[in-house]
């Protein structure tokens, strides 16, 4: 049965929280994409495993895991995401406990400290910040296995084609190297697997699409020249197209007229001294 953990809400005050709360209403999807099936396959959970899903959003992975009989702790720093997760879990009476929790918070206080679950993972939710601390928290929480999926290409929050057009540099993320170093410090031996996805760019209005495209240029303010270039770029590459919604309906949406590929790497490790099976 769905429950909500009473984590300390006053510590949840992140720059991007408002963005993810706004996205919550259109974020929900079932784990039917190639990416989600790829990740669930690599996790290779045992039947009775309890699971911590850090950065669970609206339950893309938490819901199918709970349907399969796993007790799931779904953690996210966006309350609107968790509200939808709670609704989905309650509708099917699923064994999911949601936690309003960020990487920087006190996991012990939230009941997710040492050996609190069998498996702890973070799917595309560890992009930056204190990577060493994040890896140690996952490792400590998991009795048997832990895993992360992180970008091994330009961050999904950046568009290399747009950055090149504006004359801005595109920096390759260092998160994979940082995770490997963190695991070495813990004496863990990681396994790796990679896959590729394409960032969806579908919006109900031109202004919404333009605003999201602006995020892909990075947080730095535009110069007057960059603003002119961006305005022209948005006009040229944001187009209206009929797309199919998750419910199967055809809708007119604003889309980016080229794909945004992201390479992801699965990094898994055992926390109990055994070899990854």
Image: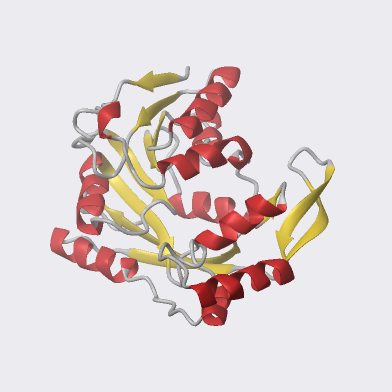
Q: Nearer the viewer, residue 75 or 218?
A: 218
Please give the name of the residue rendered at 31% of the width and 35% of the height, measured from the top-left corner.
12
Please give left or right for residue 247 compared with residue 129 in the image. right
Question: Residue 196: image x %, image y %?
Answer: 56, 67
Question: Residue 195: image x %, image y %?
Answer: 53, 66
Question: Residue 94: image x %, image y %?
Answer: 52, 22
| Residue 132, placed above or below residue 101 | below
Q: Nearer the viewer, residue 199 or 161?
A: 161
Please give left or right for residue 270 compared with residue 266 in the image. left
- Is residue 30 visible in the rendered structure shown here? no
Please give the name of the residue rendered at 30% of the width and 63% of the height, measured from the top-left corner.
190
Question: Residue 56: image x %, image y %?
Answer: 45, 40
Q: Quadrant of residue 259?
A: bottom right
| Residue 216, placed above or below residue 44 | below
Q: Residue furthest front?
A: 224
Q: Quadrant of residue 232?
A: bottom right
| Image quarter of the C terminus | bottom left
């Amino acid at each position: 049965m769905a429950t909500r953990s009473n984590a300390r809400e006053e510590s949840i005050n992140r720059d991007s929280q408002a963005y993810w709360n706004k996205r919550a209403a259109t974020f929900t999807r079932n784990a039917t994409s190639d990416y989600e099936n790829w990740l669930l396959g690599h996790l290779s959970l045992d039947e009775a495993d309890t699971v911590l899903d850090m950065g669970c959003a609206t339950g893309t992975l938490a819901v199918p895991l709970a349907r399969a009989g796993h007790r799931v702790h779904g953690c996210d720093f966006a309350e609107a995401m968790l509200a939808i997760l709670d609704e989905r879990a309650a509708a099917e009476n699923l064994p999911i406990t949601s936690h309003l929790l960020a990487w920087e918070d006190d996991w012990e206080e939230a009941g997710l400290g040492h050996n609190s679950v069998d498996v702890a993972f973070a799917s595309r939710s560890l992009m930056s910040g204190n990577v060493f601390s994040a890896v140690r928290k996952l490792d400590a929480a998991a009795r048997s296995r832990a895993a992360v999926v992180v970008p091994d290409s330009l961050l999904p929050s950046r568009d290399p084609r747009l950055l090149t057009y504006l004359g801005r540099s595109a920096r390759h993320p260092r998160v994979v190297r940082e995770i490997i170093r963190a695991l070495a410090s813990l004496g863990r031996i990681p396994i790796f697997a990679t896959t590729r996805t394409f960032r969806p760019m579908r919006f109900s209005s031109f202004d919404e699409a333009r605003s999201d495209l602006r995020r892909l240029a990075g947080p730095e303010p535009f110069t007057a020249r960059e603003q002119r270039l961006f305005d022209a770029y948005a006009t040229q590459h944001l187009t209206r197209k009929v797309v199919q919604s998750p419910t199967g309906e055809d809708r007119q949406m604003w889309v980016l007229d080229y794909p945004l590929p992201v390479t992801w790497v699965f990094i898994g490790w055992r926390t109990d001294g055994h070899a990854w099976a």
